[in-house]
Structures are given as C-alpha cells and as structure tokens.
Image (cartoon, rainbow, N blue to C red):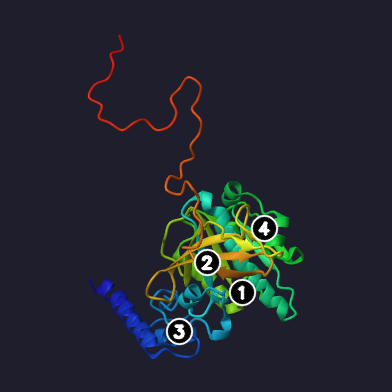
Amino acid sequence: MAENAVPRETVLALRDAIARLERDRPSGSCLSRLETEGERAGFSASGRSLPMPDVTGQHGTGQDVTRQADVLPLGVPTLDHAMSGGLPLKGLSEIRVAETRDAGAATGFTLGLAALCQARRKARGELGPILWISETMAGQEAGEPYGVGLSLLGIDLRAALFSRPRNLQQALWIAEAALGFSVFSAVILEIRGNPARLGLAESRRLQLRSMGSGVPIFLLRQAGEEEASSAHLRLLVRPAPAAPFMLPDGTMLTTGIGHPAFHVIAEKTRAFSPVDAYLEWSSHARRFHPLDPVAVPLPANAADPVTVLSASVGRPGGAPALGRVVAFKRAS
C-alpha cells in the first residue's frame, strides 16, 4: 500500500498544478509553465512524460493554444466560430469519415484546407510545399492522388510532395520528421481505421511537433471511429448535394456537376456544442462558401438510397413483400 501511495500523491499534485494553470490562463507557453509546476509537484522534465492540460479539447478557451494570428478563417461563420476564429495553423487536426465511400469528400475537404494554407504562405513570398503521407492500406482503398484534380482544387503541383511508406510506423516517422521543418505549409497524414500504433501518445507527439514548428498537420482518417486523441479539432465530413450556381452568361446551372459540397460536423472543438455546417469549395475563387441546406436540392432517391435495378432474367427483382411467414412449401 505504501508503494502505491507515492504515485497516487504525485498524480494528485500534478492534477492540482494543471487546474491552477487552467484557472490562471497564462499568456505564455503552457508547456513551460506546466514543466515548472510539475517540478514543484515532484516531476522532472527529463523523467516521466508530463500529461498535457486539456487546452486542445472541448473545454479549452483557445487562448492557450493559438493566437488570433495563428488561425485561418474558412469563410463559414458557424464553423469559424466553433474553431475560435478559424482553422488552427498550429497543432493536429483530424478529419474523418465514417464509411470508406465518403473518403473522396474528406480528401477534397482536406485538400481545400491545404490549399488555403499554401496560398497563405505564397502571399508572404514563400514556396510553402505540401507533404501528403498516405498509408499503404489507405491508398489501396481510396486510390492515388491525381495531379489534374489537385491543380483544380488549388494545389500548386510544383510544391507538392507525396509519400507512400510501407507501414504506419514509417508514416509516423516521416510525419514527425517533416514537422521538424517550418518550410512546409501543411502535412497530411492519411490512415485507415483506428490502428493501435496511432494512439494517444503518438498523437501527442505529432501535436507537440506541430506546435513547435508552426506547421499544421491534418490527420485524414478513413472509416474511423471517434477515439481519444490530442488533436484540438476533429471534423466529420460527409458528401453533400451541390447547389446550383450562376454561369458567366447569367444563366443558372441547375443540372450537371457543380462545386464540391461538404457536410461538416464539428465533433471536437473549443466550443461547448457540436456544429453542423454545409459548405462548398469554389475551384475558381479557391475558397469555401457557406451553403443553405434548405436551398440545396436533394436527389430524388434521397429517402431510399438503394439504387433500383432491373430484375434479373427468370428471377424476382426488388425487395420481397412484407408479411408473416407461417409455413414453408414442402420440398417433396
């Protein structure tokens, strides 16, 4: 009992130090203040790793993570308000899809974010390359990037790098190494599912590396569930119907392919309530625009997403009629 009492007292002292930090809301670096308070509580900076305060979760204020100059507004008021002014340009942000078939929507949304980060670097006279790291399984399910499509989304192909590591361990190593250089405008790490090798400790390392270099990293998760992470932002992306838009000659385009549209649900932000927003990406203006979900026309089969196919020859087609089976036909 005496051996277990010492670690328990140390953990309680550290929790008290974290509570004082969150209550005081220091303007300086939270990490340095936490190390100071941790040393007072009996921890050493070179010893056991210190748990970070929850300044990146839903209960943070945003002042301890980023300043106003470290966010990038997306042009969607509800989503920007939930992110305390815009997309954080420092730290780990997660964009996930619940199903593999929605991976294209999440990829397009993530590339739109990366294009905005790259345009911000180019406005300052920097090259701002983008690094896309794709896990082998994720690339096999979603496919390889297409240069023409990346260019239409606003990505400068002269400053775009693509890496295909053999496993997740190599992908994490490349991501951490890339975050050590402030030359990148954004790093995209594409994975599939919820692998055990990418847990809370690994996400915390990515978070700290990103905060130190000022390079945002986007964790693009295919068919993944919600899990504990050090990411201060997690968005669930779904495809949305495209809205009609006006052509240069003044006519309204009601048929055909419109701008890429997304249904974004903010699952983890610095706000206290979830945010549900519809937005589209303009390939010409290279920016996001909010969409009114009421004005967006839904497809005819929105109530029944199952595609109706013609019946096979000699076999009944469609779903069987509902009813109660009381007996089966005799085989002989």
Which tag, 4 or 1, sits closer to the chain's start? Answer: 4
Residue drawn 49% across the image and 72% down it: 79
Q: SS class of the residue under badge 1? A: loop
- Image depth: mark 3 or mark 2 in front: 2
Q: Residue at x 27, y 71 (%)?
A: 4
Q: Amino acid at mark 3?
A: Glu
What element does badge 2 sit on?
loop
Q: Which mark is residue 163?
A: 4
Residue in view at x 61 percent, y 77 percent: 213
Report if the CB atoms under discs 2 and 1 are less than 8 Å apart: no
The CA distance from mark 4 to mark 1 is 17 Å
Instruction: Give the foreground label among 2 and 1.
Output: 2
The residue indicated by pointer 1 is 215
Q: Nearer the viewer, residue 154 or 220?
A: 154
Amino acid tagged 1: Val
Task: Give the spatial CA distance, label 3 vs label 4.
Answer: 35 Å
Q: Is residue 41 visible?
A: no
